[in-house]
Amino acid sequence: MKDLLEPFLYPHNLLLYALLLACICYRKKGLWLIFVCYYLVGNTYLANQARLWYQQGIAAPKQAASLYVVLGCGGSAKHLPACAAARIQQLKQEFTPGQLPAVILTTRYCQPYLDYLQQQLPQVVADCFDAGDNTYQEFANLVPRLAQQRQIRFITSDFHSWRVSRLINEYQLDASIGAASTQTLRPVNCSLNCFFTVNLSNLDFYSKLIAEFSSYAVYKLGGRKLTGA
């Protein structure tokens, strides 16, 4: 009962009910528009459907590869970010016993990546280099190395996979994607109360989704001038 009733008292849900009350009292179309938008964006059932749709669009079954490319995701000379650790963990899951394919890491800060890779896969010797400041630069610098390669497997984060899939098609690479799971795309628990409440974690999901599509749109419209690729 506690789990069922407690969400109704969260501040963002109190705001939802306050908006509904204002709509009923003042009967303004603008208020109803704000209420509907706030509800739709925050509704967990709808957000979970969007998560499922996005995952189905990027899902690729685990498959053997002759070369794995782990795309970098920032960090520093001494610090490995959580997203990079998750990608290396995903790389570890992709390997089959006795398999020793080539591995490329694309990051400005190689040492933390290589150190963690050696902890997880001590038998693997990886090539690491700075391929650029963004995904588009990374692909532009990787393509000369990958042009003759077959069975490439890109390792990235799940919410980043759509953009990577578009670039794979653009450069006509024989490649697939291994996506490291993140909190962003994991379904949020949805019981009966999720139809009458909003969840702020859904806003993070939509913001990253919009950022993913917007970034690729900017790349297609502006190309090298805007992205440096």
Image (spheres, helix red, strand yellow):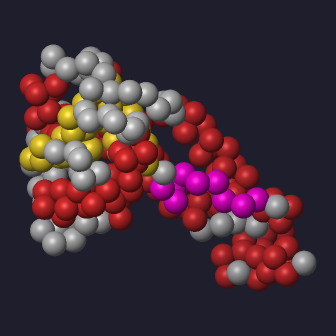
Quarter residue 111 falls in: bottom left
Q: Is residue 137 magenta?
A: no
Q: Residue at x 11, y 27 (%)?
A: 145
Residue 26 vertical placement versus 171 (above, below): below
Q: Quadrant of the N terminus?
A: bottom right
* Left-right relation of 94 to 70: right
Q: Nearer the viewer, residue 206 or 181?
A: 181
Residue 154: give x, y in percent of width and height: 31, 36
Residue 49 visible (yes or no): yes
Residue 41: give x, y in percent of width and height: 62, 56
Q: Residue at x 62, y 41 (%)?
A: 52
Numbered-mark total: 0
* Left-right relation of 100 to 130: right
Magenta stretch: dominant SS?
loop
* Left-right relation of 104 to 1: left
Residue 222: give x, y in percent of width and height: 20, 35
Q: Residue at x 13, y 57 (%)?
A: 110
Quarter residue 25 falls in: bottom right
Q: Is residue 184 magenta?
A: yes
Which residues are the magenta region?
182-190
